[in-house]
Amino acid sequence: MVSQQVLWATSPVILSLGLNLVNRQRELIAIKNKLEQKIALEDLNNRRLNHLEMQFTQWQGEQEAQVPRGQAFSQRLEALEHHLAQGLNHSSPTPAATSPSPVETLDSDGIKQLMAEVQTLLASIHPQTPDDSI
């Protein structure tokens, strides 16, 4: 009779301890799953960040490569402006003009050639993409 009373008295404690153990196991599994998800998300974000860094480095290299072309274009435009300014200065009415001005010596083919050079330089600095044509 005493052992039955001990069993009845200890059974709620034993059940509580068992449920506590089961709940702790479930909580540990849930924490482990959340941790794995966070690690996977962090790994994905790191891969994306590395990819973006590579793209940025590549883009930066492309931009740096275009700087000399832009400088060359600026120098050519300055030379063209200077050439045209000289031509305009020489084309002012002077009674003793013996040689033709640089502008007068340019025929339509020369002007077309200069325009083609300017367009080529512009295209080399900023190549037209399908989005640019819209």
Image: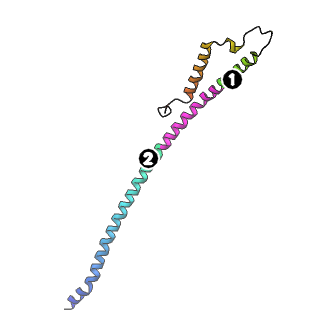
Report the residue that reaches farthest toward the top: 98
Q: Residues within 10 Å of mark 1 (few under 14, many from 20)?
A: few
Question: Is residue 49 rendered to the left or right of residue 116?
Answer: left
x, y percentage for residue 114?
61, 18
Q: Amino acid at mark 1?
A: Glu
Q: Which residue is mark 1?
A: 81
User: Which residue ends up furthest to the bottom in the rendered image?
Assistant: 1
Q: Residues within 10 Å of mark 2 (few under 14, many from 20)?
A: few
Q: At 32% across and 75% down in the image, what residue appears?
A: 20
Provide the secondary structure element on which disc 2 rests. Answer: helix
Indicate left or right for 119 with 14 as reference.
right
Question: Image quadrant for the N terminus?
Answer: bottom left
Q: Is residue 80 above or below residue 16?
A: above
Where is residue 122, by image quadrant?
top right
Give the magenta-colored segment's residue range. 52-74
Residue toward you, 28 or 83:
83
Q: Which residue is mark 2?
A: 47
Residue type, mark 2 in image: Arg
